Amino acid sequence: MHGWNVTDTFAKIKAAPWGAMEAQHHIITIEGETFDYWGSIIHPEVESLAEVVDMIVSDAIIGEESFGEMCAELGFDDPQQALDSWEGCKETARKVRKFYSGDLYDLGRE
């Protein structure tokens, strides 16, 4: 996974803002930075850390877009949900930038 130190802690300590339950909650650590992740209801365990890292990179890419670009790309109907999601993606991008300074689009295609 890009040569990074990545770990998963099946934390089960908080629910997601969109309704995923505590039982699905993980804390993913990449190079010392932590990211919340929720597995599915059917498979709450992380089956592939590589896929989770790819999702984190995808969120970081969105976090470096403008709010308008994100809304156009993802098609939000609820403005507050869109803003909350964009703010979360911006935070993800900030954390990823602590350990990766290259082009996120290239990283997302690897």
Image (spheres, rainbow, N blue to C red):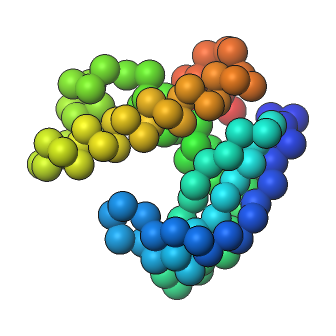
The reply to whether residue 40 is in sight is no
Relative to 102, residue 88 above or below = below
The reply to whether residue 36 is in sight is yes
- Outermost residue toward the top in this view: 102
Relative to 9, residue 78 above or below = above
- Outermost residue toward the bottom in this view: 42
Where, quadrant-wise, is the C terminus in this rendering?
A: top right
Residue in the picture at 62% in, 31% down = 95
Foreground residue among 54 and 23: 23
Relative to 9, residue 53 above or below = above
Residue in the picture at 66% in, 75% down = 45
Where, quadrant-wise, is the N terminus in this rendering?
A: top right
Foreground residue among 39 and 19: 19
Relative to 61, residue 50 above or below = below
- Outermost residue toward the front in this view: 13
x and y percent of residue 36 in the render?
58, 55
> Left of 105 or right of it: where is 3?
right
x and y percent of residue 39 in the render?
56, 70
Residue in the picture at 67% in, 70% down = 11
Residue in the picture at 34% in, 36% down = 86
x and y percent of residue 24 in the render?
55, 75
The image quadrant that residue 71 belongs to is: top left
x and y percent of residue 75 in the render?
20, 43
Tally of numbered tags: 0
> Left of 98 or right of it: where is 87?
left
